[in-house]
């Protein structure tokens, strides 16, 4: 499926947004995801799988910024974290990028003020920078399994003290 076909399939009259709880896009035959293909959707979960994506345009997810809670990109050819495409997703809670070609997380992951769960797994990540996850104040779970990490930069994560029902808990992230 090409982005033109996907765009035509999701085309609705201007000003009308169709509510979609879960949208799965499989075998998208393009290396770059771009344009306003999601402009008429109000989607909470988007899964893009088995597609040779290498690049995601910075504006492609903007139409979903108020509705998208979960984004999964599975079995792609991404070779860098699409930070600019993701930073507008303020309501995103879970981000999964699984089976990818990302080798280094060299840019801080910003925006996504409600992000609690990140799964960037089964890829080629060998390192990440100290400040990669620093701005994600609500981060609860970070899953980097199946990568080639050898070390974790010192001071990458600060321990937070969470107070709940007069009990104190220590969390790693």
Image (tube, grey):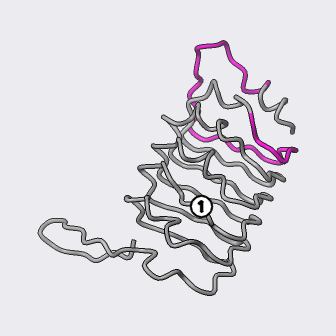
Residue 57 placement, left or right of 85: right
Q: Residue at coordinates 73% horizontally, 31% vertically from top-left?
A: 35
**In the image shown, does 138 or 20 lie closer to the viewer?**
138
Q: Determine whether the residue tagged by mark 1 lies in a helix, strand or loop.
A: loop
Q: Residue at coordinates 46% horizontally, 68% vertically from top-left?
A: 141
Q: Residue at coordinates 68% horizontally, 73% vertically from top-left?
A: 125
Q: Residue at coordinates 67% horizontally, 36% vertically from top-left?
A: 60
Whether residue 2 is situated above or below residue 127 in the rendered picture: above
Residue 146 placement, left or right of 79: left
- Asked if residue 79 lies in the magenta stretch, the reply is no
Whether residue 173 is situated above or below residue 52 in the rendered picture: below
Q: Where does residue 62 sit, x and y in percent of width and height? A: 58, 34
Residue 14 placement, left or right of 157: right
Q: Where does residue 72 sit, x and y in percent of width and height? A: 63, 53
Quarter where residue 85 is shown: top right
Q: Where does residue 51 sit, x and y in percent of width and height? A: 81, 51
Residue 56 placement, left or right of 72: right
**In the image shown, does 125 or 122 lie closer to the viewer?**
125
Which residues are the magenta region?
8-34
Q: Where does residue 66 sit, x and y in percent of width and height? A: 48, 34
| Residues packed near mark 1 inside 10 Å, few (<14), some (14 to 19) or many (20 plus) | some
Q: For the image shown, how many numbered marks are present on the structure?
A: 1
Which quarter of the rendering shows the C terminus? bottom left
Which quarter of the rendering shows the N terminus? top right
**In the image shown, does 11 or 102 lie closer to the viewer?**
102
Quarter where residue 169 is shown: bottom left
Residue holding disc 1: 107
- Asked if residue 18 lies in the magenta stretch, the reply is yes
Q: Residue furthest left?
A: 166
């Amino acid at each position: 499926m090409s982005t033109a076909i996907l765009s035509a399939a999701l085309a609705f009259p201007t000003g009308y947004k169709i509510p979609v709880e879960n949208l799965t896009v499989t075998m998208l035959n393009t290396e770059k995801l771009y344009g306003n293909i999601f402009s008429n959707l109000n989607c909470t979960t988007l899964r893009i799988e088995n597609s040779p994506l290498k690049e995601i345009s910075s504006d492609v997810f903007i139409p979903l910024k108020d509705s998208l809670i979960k984004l999964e990109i599975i079995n792609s050819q991404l070779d860098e974290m699409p930070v600019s495409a993701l930073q507008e997703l303020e309501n995103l809670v879970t981000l999964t990028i699984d089976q990818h070609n990302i080798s280094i997380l060299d840019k801080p992951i910003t925006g996504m003020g409600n992000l609690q769960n990140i799964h960037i797994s089964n890829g080629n990540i060998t390192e990440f920078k100290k400040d990669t996850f620093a701005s994600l104040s609500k981060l609860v779970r970070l899953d980097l399994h199946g990568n080639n990490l050898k070390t974790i930069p010192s001071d990458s994560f600060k321990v937070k003290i969470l107070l709940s029902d007069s009990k104190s808990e220590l969390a790693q992230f």
